[in-house]
Amino acid sequence: MKYENIHTSVRDAVAIVTLNRPKVLNALSHDMMTELADAVDGFEADDAIGVILLTGNEKAFAAGADIAEMVEKTSVDMYMSDHFARNWERISKCRKPIIASVAGHALGGGCELAMMCDIIICADNARFGQPEVKLGVLPGIGGTQRLIRAVGKAKAMDMCLSGRTMDAREAERAGLVSRVYAADVLEVEAMKLAAEIAGMSRPALYMIKEAINRAYETTLSEGLHFERRLFHAAFAMQDQGEGMRAFLEKRAPEWTHS
Ligand code: HXC
């Protein structure tokens, strides 16, 4: 598939996907999300890729779903096409780690897309928000659900009901993002983090991601049980023996991802 709304590249084991509709601050269109889903399909199936890095430009990660594309839709249109399902959610179903590297606006669907990723890091000019209330609607792809889990009820309600944005420092304090960098070094730092994670044992990464995500869906005792079973299963992996032996032999591990 030839992409018109995103750009993709590969550096070693890191796949970089750049949202690319700069004239509309990377507003998320149907075509863009189809391309994004196709790119994730390809990179998830590619054994050479360990991590996907999703990014925008210095002004915007994404300023939300494309309002022009939605304005004339009816409720029946939205319901029958199950708008915002499938390709719009593809990122959240990927088993490989995905890092969102955010500079500038991450609003509405843009904030929701970042929250579908596993880690959000951002530039000091980043702004996060769910301003849908100002359009007479509400978040439609996880804003009311993932935001509360990231920042708690008080801030989630505040942001969704008032439509206000959070700056990078508040987002870091609140737990929405894990790291904040000066805007001019974000790209380099994002690549460093992605490469570091891509250098780990793939099956261990998959297990960790699956176990953490399970915490959203289950009770503590079930989650602990699930984690312990995965931990036991990890001892069937060559990478477990290699990782532990490498530590004791004071050398770098050589993962076989098996
Ligand atoms: C379509 C958009 C857009 C969007 C910006 N643009 N956001 N087009 N959909 N979400 C377009 C503008 O119309 C404008 O086009 C160009 O991008 C530059 O935007 P400006 O507004 O001129 O820039 P600025 O003054 O710097 O303001 C930046 C901004 C503002 C604060 C981010 O653009 C803004 O408030 N955008 C909308 C944010 C929003 O409401 N997002 C939620 C969308 S609903 P022209 O042609 O005039 O140059 C949503 C629902 C999610 O996301 C449901 C699940 C996905």
Image (cartoon, helix red, strand yellow):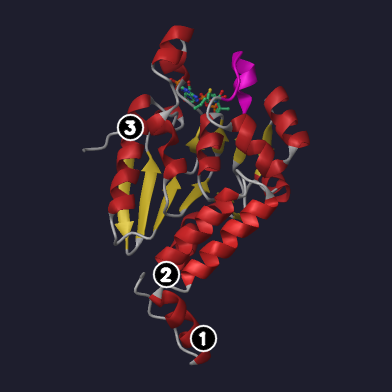
Q: Secondary structure at mark 3?
A: helix
Q: Which residues are magenta?
A: 129-139
Marks 3,2: beta carbons within 8 A: no
Q: Position of residue 235 (x, y in %)?
A: 47, 74
Give me the residue at 49% from left, 60% from top.
Answer: 207
Q: Position of residue 173 (x, y in %)?
A: 73, 50
Question: Mark 2 or mark 1, which is nearer the start of the sequence?
Answer: 2
Q: Residues within 10 Å of mark 1 (few under 14, many from 20)?
A: few
Question: Mark 2 or mark 3, which is nearer the start of the sequence?
Answer: 3
Marks 1,2: beta carbons within 8 A: no
What's the amino acid at mark 1?
A: Phe
Q: Residues within 10 Å of mark 2 (few under 14, many from 20)?
A: some
- Residue sitting nearer the eye, 154 or 134: 154
Q: Left or right? Give the position of 208 relative to 36.
A: right
Vertical side of 75 occupied by 244: above or below? below
Q: Is mark 2 within 8 Å of ligand 1?
A: no
- Nearer the viewer's eye, disc 1 or disc 2? 1
| Quarter of the image where one finds residue 163 | top right
* Disc 2 target residue: 199
Give me the residue at 45% from left, 14% from top.
Answer: 79
| Quarter of the image where one finds residue 107 | top right
What's the amino acid at mark 3?
A: Thr
Q: Secondary structure at mark 1?
A: helix
* Disc 1 target residue: 247
Asked whether residue 185 appears in the rendered view, the answer is no
* Disc 3 target residue: 34
